[in-house]
Amino acid sequence: MSDDAVEVRDVVVRYDATTAVDGVSLTVPRGRVLALLGHNGAGKTSLLQVCEGFRAADGGECRVLGLDPIGQHDELMPRLGIMLQSGGMYPWATAGELLQLFASFSANPINPDVLLDRLGLRAFEKTRFRRLSGGEQQRLSLAIALVGRPELVVLDEPTAGMDTEARHTTWQLIEELRADGVSVLLTTHLLDEAERLADDVVIMREGKVAATGAPAELTAAAGIDLLEVRADAGLRPDVPFKVTESTPGEYSIAGTLDAAAIAGVLAWFAGAGAHVTAVNTRRRTLEDVYLALTAEKAGAGR
Amino acid sequence: MTTFAPAPARNSTKAILRSQIRMELILTARRGEAVVLAMGVPLLVLLGAGLTHVLALTVMSTAFTGQAITTGYERSYGVLKRLGASPLSRPGLLFAKTAAVLALIVVQLLVLAAVGVAVGWRPHAGQLLPALGITVLATAAYTGLALFLASVLKPETTTGLATLIYVLMLAAGGIMFAAPGGVSEFLPLAAHAEALRATLSHDQPVPLGSWASLAVWAAVCVVAAARKFRWE
């Protein structure tokens, strides 16, 4: 098989009658960041469980760092940094003890003190895990995932429960990981997180891949698709696009708008002698793509 | 300047296990009630029954009751899952837990024996090896039963049941009262206590009935644990 960090082919995960993951394929090339995006229950965590060797796939194939996550579990684990969605720590051990414990599992760990400082955990070094807030627990889990200098980190909703500052610290860390050649597979439902961090985004819906590509590919395909014009109220623009006047004088013109089309629309306003006070264009964001894809699901469900 | 440049390497197994065993013992010491259960109750029993019975009871409370409760909660907290997915590995975690239990039992038995000697108990050393052998067998049976219960029940249920079993064994195992005839030899606690009494107090070999009873318990419990053990 290839030298990719993660290679997932047609993986299926079933829980009794429900199919959580229904034939998903994806690849995380070495040194890149892939974000799995989707609603709760879209199958993201189940897919990670297969990659981390916690459960066998009911179909398909999964290779992580070229290894079988179950058959070669003990060989794989030292090379992998895992952050679970929650828990996984002794509640009565302190943050410092836990980080030290996991550091001691590695022959060449990152200095725990450095990680405590970077993740703002110094003040909680002697605090027991169960006394930490959700965001503090997440930061500690992240530090533990990184302490063994892994080749690949798998982060399940790494910034859930973090405040804005911690979230930005985490984003910065992930960017540094990438710059240093670490491969990253993460899940999120934060679109700005995926847009900022990921080289590749895989949008999952009901256990299947709904869309995949670089954030720019997913958002740029349609170019500018919304033109907003503020002018006199009650105009009836005669243009070959869908026009809505949501509030009096605020016109939204939707469609595939290239330079000529925009010029045409504005020419109509000029010809009508309208008093134009604002013009704004908008490209699709990852959020639009995501909402469009997940809205299809809601529609199909009814 | 830290770099995250990948350089993963498992530490030596010895270093990993030393570290994990240390953590297990720190956390045990931190749970005061477990230590009280493991040492306090036997010390009280010491006043009413023989010292060898107390030694047997201590092994049960540590290897069975304490182990079932901690393992149940560690499973529900995801600790077993997370540590199993670290360089420690799953076999390493099981080994460390077993070693920590044995270390704790050794310390407890030494303390109790010292108390016993101080109040005039004079054990025979001639049958020490069989006494240790039967103790390891009892520990295996208790640990197996503990891991089995912790795997099939919720942690709260495990705690309740493990405590109930402890109390029932205490009552029926011939520790506090004379055992109802015939029943008690089949119970691991009674078989173990009887074996310790024979060897340490009377310098006699371990009774065949004790070997047989504990061997069956150990085989059944360890097989049940191995088949049902769950990491999450």
Image (cartoon, coloured by chain):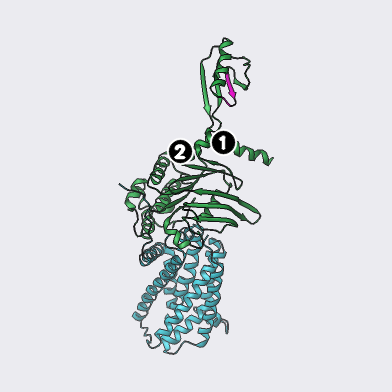
Chain colours: A green, B cyan
Tell me the distance, in whole angstroms, between the alpha carbons under discs 1 and 2. Answer: 15 Å
Q: Is residue A253 above or below residue B78?
A: above
Q: Residue furthest left?
A: B1
Q: Nearer the viewer, residue A142 or B198?
A: A142
Q: Residue furthest right?
A: A302
Q: Residue at x 67, y 40 (%)?
A: A300
Mark 1, residue position: A289
Q: Chain of mark 2?
A: A
Q: Does the stretch in magenta take in A94?
A: no
Q: Which residues are magenta?
A: A250-257
Q: Secondary structure at mark 1?
A: helix
Instruction: Please state the horizontal and vertical placement of residue A108, each as a whole percent of the image.
Output: 34, 57
Q: Is residue A25 above or below residue B32?
A: above
The part of the image, by quadrant, that contains residue A267 is top right
Same chain for the residues at labels 1 and 2, yes or no? yes
Mark 2, residue position: A196
Q: Chain of mark 1?
A: A
Q: Does the stretch in magenta take in A251?
A: yes
Instruction: Please state the horizontal and vertical placement of residue A32, each as a whole percent of the image.
Output: 45, 46
Q: Secondary structure at mark 2?
A: helix
- Residue B108 seen from this side: yes
Q: Nearer the viewer, residue B65 or A27?
A: A27
Give the label on residue A246, or none: none
- Residue B30 lies left or right of residue A204; in this view the side is left
Instruction: Please state the horizontal and vertical placement of residue B96, each as a whole percent of the image.
Output: 42, 67
The amino acid at mark 2 is: Arg
The amino acid at mark 1 is: Val
